[in-house]
Amino acid sequence: MKTFVMLICLMTGFISGCASLNNQTVEFRATSSTSFGISSDQFNTVELQPSEILLWKGADLIGSITTVKTNPQSETAINEVKQGFVEAQKGPGAPRELTLPEGAYGFASSFRGFTTAFIAVVGDSEFWITISVKDDVFDQVLSSITVR
């Protein structure tokens, strides 16, 4: 009987432990031409706000995704993000240009444990996006960015 109970406990442990092996990348389509992915083990709640999407893991904010309308004076989203990079260089942070797929331009800046990417795509003049995630998740997000 002890062996049977022990076997049941071990099976339960294996089954519940294996559930975490099913982690997958969740694709976010931020604009009609830009998408990126975040591993499903990084967050467990998606909160929809009027102007952004917040990603949570329990009570911890993991990141946010925002679509920003291009200012008409900038003419294109790429111009606006490039101007943002120039302005960010005047601030206390150390913004850096990102290596992105062809047709995209962006830069990132880190602050208080989060890195925020500002990204625009040639084919989308009306909108650009910001992706702000915890520093330890940023490289995964950056490597998954695709332009359609």
Image (cartoon, rainbow, N blue to C red):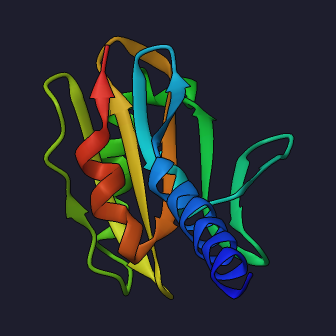
Q: Position of residue 28 (x, y in %)?
A: 53, 33
* Vertical order, 102 against 39 (above or below): above
Residue at x 36%, y 63% (from the top left corner): 138
Residue drawn at x 13%, y 25% is: 102
Q: Find residue 83 and report its horizontal and vertical position in percent.
A: 34, 48
Q: Nearer the viewer, residue 102 or 71?
A: 102
Seen in the picture, residue 101 relative to 116 is either above or below; the reply is above
Residue drawn 29% across and 22% down? 147
Residue, x 73% and y 45% (percent of image)? 52
Q: Is residue 58 above or below residue 120?
A: below
Where, quadrant-wise, is the C terminus in this rendering?
Answer: top left
Image coords of residue 109 (percent x, y):
36, 70
Q: Nearer the viewer, residue 129 or 136?
A: 136
Residue 37: x, y in percent?
A: 42, 41
Instruction: From this view, report whether residue 145 is shown above or below residue 84.
Output: above
Q: Is residue 62 visible?
A: yes
What is the tally of numbered marks visible in this picture?
0
Q: Check the image and name the residue furthest to the right.
A: 50
Q: Is residue 6 left or right of residue 135?
A: right
**In the rendered image, is residue 86 in sight?**
no
On the rendered structure, is 4 left or right of 93? right
Which quadrant of the figure has residue 78? top left
